[in-house]
Amino acid sequence: MAGESVRPSLLFVCTANMCRSPLAAALARRALSDAGAEVASAGFLPGGHQIPADTVRVATGLGVRLESHQSTQLTPGILALADLVITMTRQQARELVADDAELWPRVFTIKQFARWITAHRPPAAGLSRAWLEAEASGRHPVEMLGADPDDDVIDPMGHPPRVWNAVAHELVAAVDEIAAALRPRLSSPSTP
């Protein structure tokens, strides 16, 4: 119906869907809870695994619960449902676009998207796939190739708690920036 706010589907992707992407998705769900955005996560590796204790510890420290999370493997069907695909690394973004070039306008690393959405505010109706595809299709390819290694969120698996905490801090900062840019648009009332 014309004038209604858009409720986009955000998909967070990492390698195994056992630390970064479920944590980012949980943070986004909380930050956008009043906005009605659909938020999911998936990974490149086979799913069905419990997340490690370190992820649960970090999530609990941030006030989100992930104890019941089971990893999910990324499929073409999951990608098709996502209006926006947010990866943790430039390499993950490249792999997705290499497999399906049509995804190009909808794929960003989390840090790239935080910067981009701040500079490209969605219309009053909200972030939609159509708007994103039109607005982001003109991005320079170097953004996808990844000129800046700081756009990657490292995989904390196998690292000490200080690395996990640093990753959590990066994810919180990026999700907060994304939510600040999206929330006013997502929760704006319908207009006749």
Image (spheres, grey):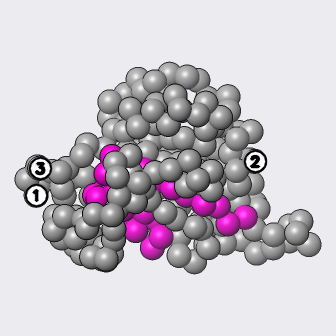
Q: Nearer the viewer, residue 114 or 98?
A: 98
Q: Magenta residues, as a range?
A: 6-30
Taking the image as shown, residue 150 lies to the left or right of residue 4, namely left
Identified at 28% across, 63% down, the residue is 49
Q: Earlier in the sequence, mark 1 or mark 2?
A: 2
Mark pair 3, 2: CA separation: 40 Å
Identified at 51% across, 44% down, the residue is 113
Q: Is residue 118 visible?
A: no
Q: Which x, y percent locates residue 73?
A: 41, 54
Q: Nearer the viewer, residue 149 or 103?
A: 103
- At label 2, the amino acid type is Ala
Q: Which residue is mark 2?
A: 130
Taking the image as shown, residue 171 lies to the left or right of residue 77, namely left
- Crowding at dot 1, Cα within 10 Å, few <14 / some 14-19 / many 20+, comes out as some
> What quarter of the picture does the N terminus occupy?
bottom right
Q: Which x, y percent locates residue 177?
A: 47, 55
Taking the image as shown, residue 68 lies to the left or right of residue 159, namely right
Q: Which residue is mark 3?
A: 158
Q: Is residue 20 magenta?
A: yes
Examine the rendered structure and indicate whether residue 63 appears above or below residue 93. below
Q: Which residue is mark 1?
A: 161
